[in-house]
């Protein structure tokens, strides 16, 4: 493995990922020692949609945008992930191509293994094999949940959930509230929430008037998180 600050830091990141959860320390260290390092400056891509799925990555530092392009070339932002997250995991299931593009949203550092390299460890570790199935199950569940939300939930709930998820992943506490530390346009939020730019702009303007958020051109501050939680969970508004 190319030099990281320390092998210890990598093994700590690995333990936070489902794929390596519960494995003995010695096993995690052996898998870490077989990893390859890849660094990517902000704005560059670890891989593009349609590239051969030849590597399974673990993000060690930084943040990534996972996006998907339609046949007409329009791009939709699906997720933002932070350190400790796996990406490109479809390679575990021997998928031929990556279904999304993975772009560094900040200077990022990841490690990767080829499917063959990981399979050598899977053959020797039943726990790793079970975890690999869990990773695939999590992906299926995520897609099912997203479909259900798009089919049944109001736009306000979906947008509130998106902002709360981003705040949990990248949030920084400031005097004004929780800053989502990621350049995000209203179009990005529309894509992640499965709605239109017009709807996102309308809702954010309303929430800003209500003191729930503060919004700039590419910046969002969650001023009153509990207010967004109420919307996300469809809880009744407290009467004064």
Image: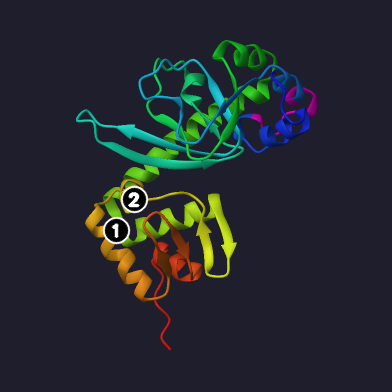
Where residue 129 sits in the image (x, y, percent)?
A: 61, 22
For label 2, the residue is 193
In front: 4, or 71?
A: 4
In front: 94, or 80?
A: 80
Q: Is residue 75 left or right of residue 43?
A: left
Badge 1 marks a residue whose secondary structure is helix
Q: Residue furthest left?
A: 72
Which residue is drawn at the image coordinates 42% and 15% (left, top)? 52
Which residue is drawn at the image coordinates 66% and 30% (left, top)? 20
- Over which residues does the magenta segment extend? 20-28
Badge 2 marks a residue whose secondary structure is helix
In this rendering, the answer to whether 141 lies above or below 28 is below
Position of the C terminus, as image quadrant, is bottom left
Which of the 4 image quarters holds residue 158?
bottom left
Q: Residues within 10 Å of mark 1 (few under 14, many from 20)?
A: many
| First in sequence: mark 2 vs mark 1 | 2
Q: Residue furthest right?
A: 26
Where residue 7 sits in the image (x, y, percent)?
A: 76, 28
Which residue is drawn at the image coordinates 35% and 75% (left, top)? 209
In front: 49, or 16?
A: 49
In this rendering, the answer to whether 225 lies above or below 88 is below
Position of the N terminus, as image quadrant, is top right
User: Does the magenta run of residues contain 208?
Assistant: no
Alpha carbon of mark 2 to alpha carbon of mark 1: how far? 9 Å
Q: Which mark is residue 200?
A: 1
């Amino acid at each position: 493995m190319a030099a990281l600050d320390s092998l210890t830091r990598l093994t700590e990141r690995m333990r936070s990922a489902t794929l390596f959860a519960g494995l003995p320390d010695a096993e995690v260290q052996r898998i870490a020692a077989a990893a390859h390092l890849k660094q990517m400056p902000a704005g560059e891509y670890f891989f593009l949609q349609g590239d051969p799925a030849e590597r399974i990555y673990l993000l060690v530092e930084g943040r990534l945008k996972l996006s998907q392009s339609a046949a007409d070339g329009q791009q939709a932002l699906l997720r933002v992930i932070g350190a400790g997250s796996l990406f490109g995991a479809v390679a575990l299931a021997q998928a031929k191509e990556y279904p999304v593009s993975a772009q560094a949203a900040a200077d990022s550092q990841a490690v990767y293994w080829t499917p063959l390299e990981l399979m050598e460890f899977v053959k020797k570790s039943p726990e790793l094999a079970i975890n690999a199935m869990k990773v695939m199950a999590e992906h299926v569940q995520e897609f099912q949940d997203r479909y259900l939300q798009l089919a049944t939930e109001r736009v306000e709930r979906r947008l509130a959930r998106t902002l709360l998820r981003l705040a949990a992943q990248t949030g920084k506490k400031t005097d004004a509230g929780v800053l989502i530390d990621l350049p995000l346009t209203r179009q990005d939020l529309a894509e992640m929430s499965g709605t239109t730019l017009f709807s996102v702009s309308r809702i954010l303007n309303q929430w800003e008037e209500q003191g729930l958020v503060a919004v700039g051109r590419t910046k969002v501050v969650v001023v009153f998180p509990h207010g967004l939680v109420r919307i996300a969970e469809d809880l009744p508004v407290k009467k004064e």
